[in-house]
Image (cartoon, helix red, strand yellow):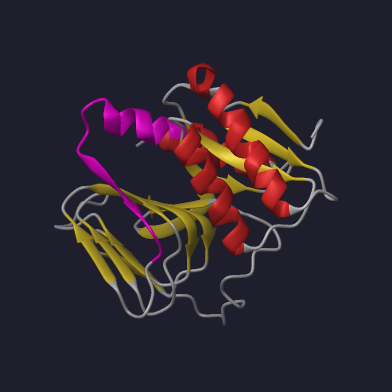
Amino acid sequence: MKDAVLIKSFPNGIALHLDGEVPFEKLLDEIAYKFSEARNFFGHASMALSIEGRHMSGAEEIMILEAIKQNSDLNIICIVGKDENTNKNFIKALAHMEKKLSGGDEGQFFKGSLKNKEVLETENSIIVLGDVYPGSAVISAKNVIILGGLYGEVYAGGNGQEKAFVAALEMEPERIKIGDFKYKPTTKQSKWGIRPKVQPKIAYIKNNRITFEPLTKDMLSNF
């Protein structure tokens, strides 16, 4: 199956080019084989994954992630779109935050989406590898990074910590509270779960109000 699966790298990420004509089951076998062969090359790196060449359903993406997990030591932290500068900035920012947490800062990861009014609460900074759906909430005494869409609520910087921040790949919250400051949108949100264009943003306190700005590595370096 020549060139049915091509693996190319970019900073902090891997691009997986898939043949659009080959049956998915055969592609899955080829993905497993190629990542098994490259296991030592990739090591234990944390990377983002871009899937290109054909449209994938959510179930198929999960099967690809499982094949990579079973045949490599990689930690795939997210799936991003093709040639998105905003994605690259977000990946760099997350790599910075992961390095900071692994260097001794208290923090944790949560894998999965929050839905059906679920609430995730922690005393540490947290990276959520999924979406936060309407009605659900993340509550952290420190910082919150959502590697997905924020459509529900986030409460960061407990006990009045105004230097905390909230970052998300898609920022359309029902409500955000950072320290003692609150934000609630006055306009109707677009339909959550649909991302025509990924727009990573960070929310933090500036001039005594919650401010939203594009998320970059340099921005996170200030915190």
- State the residue in front, 128 or 111: 111
Is residue 188 one of those drawn in magenta? no
Instruction: Give whichever of 14, 67 is nearer the camera.
Output: 67
Q: Quadrant of the N terminus?
A: top right
* Left or right: 185 as drawn, with respect to 32: left
Taking the image as shown, residue 168 lies to the left or right of residue 20, namely left
Residue extending furthest right? 21
Q: Which residues are magenta?
A: 95-113
Q: Nearer the viewer, residue 134 or 208?
A: 134
- Give me the residue at 68% from left, 38% from top: 16
Question: Residue at position x 44%, y 58% from top?
Answer: 130
Q: Quadrant of residue 111?
A: bottom left
- Give the answer, above or below, for where 64 lies relative to 60: above
The answer to whether one can see residue 97 in this image is: yes
**24 relative to 136 in the view: left or right:** right
Image position, residue 170 (x, y; %) = 54, 59
- Residue 11: x and y, percent? 60, 26
Rendered-image quadrant of the C terminus: top left
Residue at 62% from the left image edge and 47% from the top image edge: 80
The answer to whether 138 is drawn above or below residue 43 in the figure is below
In the displayed structure, does residue 86 sit left or right of residue 113?
right
Residue 40 locus on image (x, y percent): 49, 17
Residue 110 covered by magenta stretch: yes
| Image: 76 above or below 3 | below
Residue 222 shows in the view: no
Identify which residue, 186 or 37, lies in the foreground: 37
Residue 106 in the image: above or below residue 155? above
x, y percent for residue 167? 43, 51
